[in-house]
Amino acid sequence: MSDRSSEEELLEFLYACPVGLIECDAAGEIGMINPHAMQHLLPLAGASGASNLFSALQQHAPELRSVVSAFTAPIGRICDGHRIFVDLGVGRRTSAPKVLTCTIVKLGPDRLMATLTDVSQQIVQEQRLRQADTWFATLLDGVHDYATLEITPDGKIASANACFTRQTGFNHLEVTGQDLAKVLRTEETGGDLRLEEQFEIAGSDGWHLQEGWQQRAGGEPYWCQRLVVARSTGDGTMPTGFSVVLRDVPRREEAGADLQRLLTRDPLTGSANRRHFSQSMEQEQTRWREFRQSLSLIVLDLDHFKVVNDTHGHPIGDLLLCSVATACAGLLPPRGIFARLGGEEFGVILPRYDREQALDLAEEMRKAIAALVVQSPGGIVKATASFGCATLDEAEGSIDDLLALADTRLYAAKRDGRNRVHQVEGRAA
């Protein structure tokens, strides 16, 4: 039997409880308060201190005192989830204000128990869902050439418009009640997010937009822009359904150069630039945290590239860089990103590729580079490259550690003789 007293056990519970707990009398004088409640009250109380619940919340929730006074029953719940909007950064706020909910229960004639909970993130989520719902309804007012579907929370098609038939070939009346994933046959190779993952992101952020290959009823592939919007009818944070808009669009790379391309592409090779590479890594890191799917990185560096520039001139060196970029980009999976990181160094982001797949692709790229032939006035120019591969799992989710690990393996490949992919322990060369 435990020799600990009930008082000790109660104190341990109050200290560990993740919700702010306060015991006070009918006038608000606090008799007991746990650490979480103290963290909420102290910043609000100011000079008045946190000895009285109503005084501490006077500036932000002055109505609480009268709400308690008006409750005449001997015991019972006085208020439940009463929202207290707190703005601690007036005039300099850079984020959403803090929001607390307060629940007060009357335990006896002069005894109250109150809880304080921070629901700031929940409020932000509710606002996102309402904004997405309003925005989507406004968008559809003038839409006639977009296929639209209403989807139930369990992923079934509740309704579809006539444009869905024209775009996909599926009868918009006959698909009602079917699973959306079975009707929208998408191409998922190379790491494209599955439909259920797109819905999960939409449920969290309010909406999600993605482009990719999709099949019509007859099996013909087409490039489709898919917008998933979470719908909400109440104040809850969980969506009550989804709306999906499908648009048949030309491939982005076939639409011509635009501002986006200028901002994301290396002007010499046409590969992604370092800025776009960094932004993409951060986006994929977020998806890795949410879905824990494989994410691999390849870094490669051309061997003795300075000799090419010094012997044949920079124009030939530039031509060789462009040839390398073209050869490697042609081996990428659909969501892979090939980027020029600087000089003769390149990086490859591979969503949903594990270590073995990344090593295999790196070997294909190595062979493709070694097979290149560039003609110059001084003769034939050839090149080789050294490779290092790493996964975000190995780096425990850190982008900096991922880059450092891949670089370490790249330079190990150079030390071992160049023109090779560094083989990590546990894999045969």
Image (cartoon, rainbow, N blue to C red):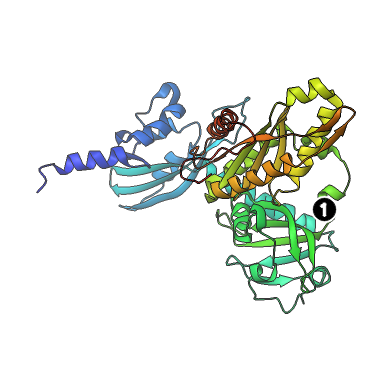
Give SS at disc 1: loop
**Quadrant in which residue 404 is drawn:** top right
Residue annotated with mark 1: 251
Question: Is 265 on the left-hand or right-hand side of 40?
Answer: right
Residue 386's x, y, as percent?
Answer: 64, 34
Q: Which residue is nearer to you in this view: 160 or 10?
A: 160
Q: Could you tell me residue 332's position as x and y percent?
A: 71, 48
Tell me the residue at 82%/29% (across/down). Answer: 318
Quarter residue 344 falls in: top right
Instruction: Look at the picture and state if 76 lies above or below 339.
Output: below
Horizontal side of residue 377 vs 158, given as left or right: right
* Residue 266 seen by the camera: no
| Front-most of residues 161 and 116 | 161
In the rendered image, residue 133, in percent from the top left (x then y), is placed at 69, 55
Number of on-image labels? 1
Residue 341 vertical placement versus 78 (above, below): above
Q: Residue furthest front?
A: 379
Specify whether residue 243 is in view: yes
Characterize the local packing of mark 1: few (<14), some (14-19) or many (20 or more) Cα atoms within 10 angstroms.
Answer: some
Residue 313 as seen in the image, left or right of residue 429: right
Residue 14 percent location from the top left of the image: 29, 40
The residue lying at 82 percent from left, 53 percent from top is 251
Q: Looking at the rendering, which quadrant does residue 232 occupy? A: bottom right
Query: Front-most of 153 and 59?
Result: 153
320 shown above or below 253: above
Q: Which kind of residue does numbered mark 1 sit on?
A: Arg
Q: From what the image shows, is residue 74 above or below residue 387?
A: below
